[in-house]
Amino acid sequence: MATAATVSTLVVGAGQAGISLVTALRELGDTGPVVLVGAEPEPPYERPPLSKSYLRGEHDRGSLVFHDAAWFADLGVELVTGDPVVTIGRDASGGSATTASGRTLTFERLALTTGAVNRGLGVEGADLDGVHSVRTLADADRLAPRLRAAREVVVVGGGFIGLEIAAGARALGSDVSVVEATDRLLGRAVTPVLSDAVLQAHERRGTRILLRSHAVRLTGEHGRVTSVQLDDGTELPADLVVVGIGAAPSTALAAQLGLLVEPRGIVVDEYALTSDGVTVAAGDCAVGPNPFDRGEPGTMRLESVPHATDQARAAAATLVGHPTAYDRVPWFWSDQGDLRLQMAGLPHGADRTVVRGDVAAERFSLLSYRDGLLIAVESVGVPTDYLAVKRALEKGMTIEADSAADTSVPLKRLITRARGTRTS
């Protein structure tokens, strides 16, 4: 028989955004009952190590978990794991959700932090044994022993996750090929200069990069993958294939609620508020206004830990009646073996890129400008540059482009007030 419970706030989705939202609720003084519901059997955990150090055996499972049961008990938060919400409905005063086990949860306030799911390859042979993707801890647990034993690895997709896994496989001694459909690596996220630098760095480490290439068929023997066939007829031997071609936002529950949803996610405003005016959404499932005032206008879906955390805090503030616009400077990082990328701001729409340092030596920064105003930094091996620009952007400051390339002068000494802005 289904059981029922009434809570002040129901948070659906126990990833980075979900755990950040319930934490922020308590930090903002909210004391009402909260239920955090996750589809996975594990308590909320860090996801970034899954494509990097966890695959190499450098983290045990316990070290990934954010908080133990006592933490949730102390905060008055009920954590439900392994029992996803499957149906949901609401009106202006509240609503009701049902989990897969038949449990009913009635609520006054609702937050959707449902995340995203990996896109499938969608070609013949994609269901063969030895074909993997990584998004969850269970995914990483299945892949890790295979990766350590693999001899020939093909990674389909030249985004952050694909390149992180490729770097790990190469470090473990595998022959690695990366198949990317577009004309450059990391094309949706970084400047062409960084794309080219990352490609060369991976090739120096022995990874084969194939741009403008499409996997059209996976072949196997006895149910296990043995090769990847490309659109130009090339056949790449593979005893392991890892697919990293992006993620689709999880919007089914939002659609049930009649919320405005587009292919990129659940539509929210700068306060993380959805189209019904009462439900909030945050993290990988949401698409909203660019939070960076120097970025291109319009809406976007950002996939990163900092974004999920910051947008979830904005959502919590909205729920407690103190709406605060989400306007943080986006920042990201990616560890690809011994290659560490750090980025702040958004380089989209830049009309000038200043190269600072030695690209070939993998110690450089790229500063992006639009109309003479600094809008982003991409650093490899120079964390001081990254931090200087991140802090400058957060304070509404800039660095003159004509001075930025001089590595004899620390960037923090070049920071000046941006015309037409005020410092904070």
Image: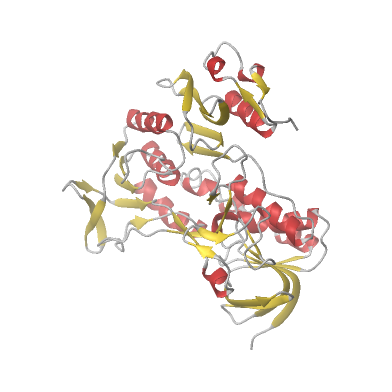
Q: Looking at the rendering, which quadrant does residue 266 occupy?
A: bottom right
- Residue 157: where, in percent of width, then height? 36, 47
> Percent x, y for residue 102?
60, 82
Residue found at the far left of this picture: 233
* Residue at 37%, 43% in the rendered image: 158
Q: Viewed as shown, does residue 192 lie left or right of 399? A: left
Residue projecting furthest to the bottom: 1
Viewer-side residue, 190 vs 199: 190
Q: How many marks?
A: 0
Q: Quadrant of the N terminus?
A: bottom right
Please provide percent x and percent y for residue 178: 32, 42
Residue under the image location 61 percent in, 68 percent down: 81
Image vertical order of residue 71 relative to residue 109, above or below: above
- Residue 349: horizontal and vertical position, in percent? 48, 36
Asked whether residue 48 appears in the rendered view, the answer is: yes
In the picture, which quadrant includes the C terminus? top right
Residue at x-position 40% and y-position 38%: 167
| Up/down of 212 relative to 351, above or below | below
